[in-house]
Image: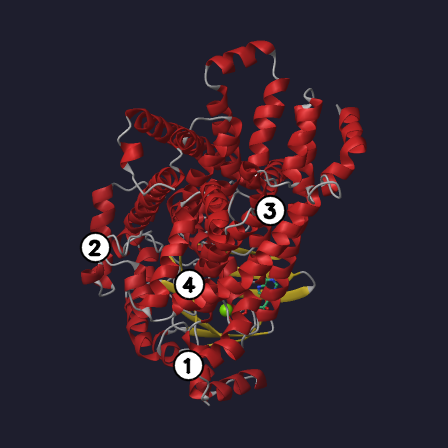
Amino acid sequence: MNTIAPSKNSPMIALTGVHKSYGNYEVLKGIDAEVARGEVVVICGPSGSGKSTLIRTVNRLEEIGSGSISCDGNNIHQPMPAKELNRLRSRIGFVFQSFNLFPHLSAIDNIAMSPMRVKGLQRDVAYAKATKLLERVGLADKANAFPAQLSGGQQQRVAIARALAMEPPVMLFDEPTSALDPEMVGEVLSVMKGLAADGMTMMCVTHEMGFARDVADRVWFIDQGQIVESARPEDFFSRPQTQRAQRFLSELRH
Amino acid sequence: MISDIIAIIRDYWLLLLIGQYPNGPLGGLAATLLLSILAIAFAFPVSIALALARLSNSPFLNWPVTALVYFTRGVPLLMLILWGYFLVPLVTGANVPSFLTMLVTLVVYQGAFLSEVVRGGIVALGHGQMEASRALGHSYLGAMRYVILPQALYNVIPSIISVFVATIKDTTLGYVINVPDLTFAASQINNQLLTQPFQVFFILAAVYYVICWSLSRVAIVTERRITRKRAGTASQATAKSLKLAALTDQPS
Amino acid sequence: MSNFDLSEILGNPEYVAMLLLGIKMTFVVAIGSWTLAMTLALLLLGLRYAPGPVGNAFVTAYVSYHRNVPTLVQLLLWYFGIFTLMPDPVTFWLNDHNAEAIFAVIGLGLCQAAYFSEDLRSGMRAVSPGQMEAARALGHSYVSAMRFVMVPQGSRNALPALINHSVSLFKNSSLAVAIGVAELTYAVKEIENLSFRTFESYLLVTVLYLVFSLMIMALGAYVARRADPVRSGRA
Ligand SMILES: Nc1ncnc2c1ncn2[C@@H]1O[C@H](COP(=O)(O)OP(=O)(O)OP(=O)(O)O)[C@@H](O)[C@H]1O
Ligand SMILES: [Mg+2]
């Protein structure tokens, strides 16, 4: 196992020459990029450009064709026993567009179950931590509610708490607010802002440009399987370098 | 063993196919199929009427049909056949052939059954279609006739085929009142041969298998075609189709 | 036709004894075959998910046979066919131990297992694939994700179908009369023959079947409500 001792200066996530195809269709055409520790990266780009595919390769929900991805010093796509992959995944938080809460478990059970079953945490420890996390996402009063009894925004906040319960050093978000009614987007974004303020390393696919402007350290603009631009948000929004990015931004504003 | 089976088929194929006909009533496979086809053909209109009655707001229509549905769901078909055997001659006052008694029983039983399928198809459509038709000025029955039923019945075609398969399997129970069907023919052969029961019933099982399997394939292919056609319009809730499948796909 | 009079049957200890014996036998057959069916169904489901194509092909064939051949014919094949092919010692033993009932349990149980296993499989398939992904993203192994996320939801999805099929299994216990098991339908025919009270005896047994079926449905509805976290009042 070529685990590089993670140092303060090494990037949290490093993608090198990542290619991926579905059959003949090349979705990712050579991605080279890094996310530093504590950095917040927002990924945007037109529909079908490969954003979801890219972010899902980071915790290996999606396999890659060639290249390599390291996260917190671990080479994610090298051959390894299933056990090791599970351990690595538990250290990468992932938030889905469609929440994917476990409908048969209450909010607090959703959060406490995996720390107990995957990490072997004691029950009382897991529940104490789950309670704290529910407070953190502003849902302390919903501990015993089931997903079906929660609004979309509340579900997504529970989903974030569930991912945080594994104490990952990095969090990935795939369009966490695009399945939500407009009035619920804010509550989820503010939880994410809080996370960023606490120094969490984050990779977010989102079209919430306000969030990108306020919170992101860097914006990656993806088109047709390539990172076309990588810039600080203020630069990206005021001076997009490529025509494709200009077109994308003007369409987004309309 | 295999040569026994071939010999039985060679000697008795006509009995298995049409029973004693023309020297007696039509029997064998022909009777099984005729009985099933007639049963489903009569049960179909009956089921639509029952479904509409059960969906209506009038307790006079709603209540008896609900009772009938629970009755047929709760009482073994065998018991209903015995009732039919007892009641049909009593009501008609004539000596009715067992084939006809069985037909009447199956129409009631599968009619009630099918009505739940049809009702499921109507409910699955949702309120939108009815509201849109009423907004256009259709009467309730007009909307049913021209908008709701055409869609609902089309969507439940696969379930109707499944009920048909179930009906074929149900006809075997006619043995209690000596309906001369395929199973009856096989028992006759078994009684004549005495020494080869396994071979005889194996043939019987094989014939049913081929027929029911083929029809089930038709149901599956139809289901796929309908799902594909519908894919553009509304997506159906999985839970609903699950319940519907559980209803039609009955052992018998 | 004499006037309707239930006491002709219920007042006669001999008939009442026949009825009670019939009820007992119906329950022996129904509960025995239900237990066998559920056990087999779980094994079949396990085979379905086992790696390699052999298990899956076997289950497909098993399900196909038991769903496309009438249950009655399956029973006849067991009792009149397979039974006679068994070696003598087995035959003797079975004949000493109510062979009819044993074959009714085997025949009905094997048949019902095909339905139960398909119910469970459809229930599992109705769990959204996002659930497995979410569990894997949290670091659960395949087995752990199955145990804590997929199976609890899949079995709940399967409940309505399992209940429906349990009721029809109970009703199908009446088919055992065809191979001479002295269950409820057998009892009613006996009583009718002896008493000439067709209407009364049919009515009595029909009501009994109906009450038992409704009880199974009610029990099923209760279990389903208990299993539904939102409606069970645990929330
Ligand atoms: N399992 C799959 N098989 C084949 N093609 C796929 C598969 N998953 C995704 N694709 C294709 O890969 C391309 C990239 O998909 P991806 O989901 O990454 O896009 P995206 O940028 O996330 O788009 P969106 O904004 O719509 O979510 C799309 O053209 C999509 O059709
Ligand atoms: Mg996407």
Identify the residue under disc 1.
Answer: B131
Q: Which-is-in-front pick, marks 3 and 4?
A: 3
CA distance separating discs 2 and 3: 69 Å
Q: Looking at the image, is mark 4 or mark 2 earlier in the sequence?
A: 4
The local crowd at label 4, few if under 14, some if 14 to 19, many if 20 or more residues have their Cα within 10 Å, is: many
Read off the chain for label 2: A
CA distance separating discs 3 and 1: 45 Å
Location of residue C193 in the rendering, given as x and y in whole percent from the top left corner: 43, 30
CA distance separating discs 1 and 4: 36 Å
Q: Quadrant of residue B79?
A: top left
| Secondary element type, mark 3 | helix
In the picture, the quarter occupied by the N terminus of chain B is top right
Read off the chain for label 4: A
Q: Are marks 3 and 1 in contact (CB under 8 Å)?
A: no
Identify the residue under disc 2.
Answer: A131
**Amino acid of disc 4:** Phe
Q: Quadrant of ligand 1?
A: bottom right
Q: Which-is-in-front pick, marks 1 and 2?
A: 1
CA distance separating discs 3 and 4: 61 Å
**Amino acid of disc 1:** Glu
| Secondary element type, mark 4 | loop
Disc number placed over residue B204 in the picture, else none: none
Q: Quadrant of residue A193?
A: bottom left
Identify the residue under disc 3.
Answer: B99
**Amino acid of disc 2:** Thr
Identify the residue under disc 4.
Answer: A96
Q: Which-is-in-front pick, marks 3 and 1?
A: 3
**Amino acid of disc 3:** Phe
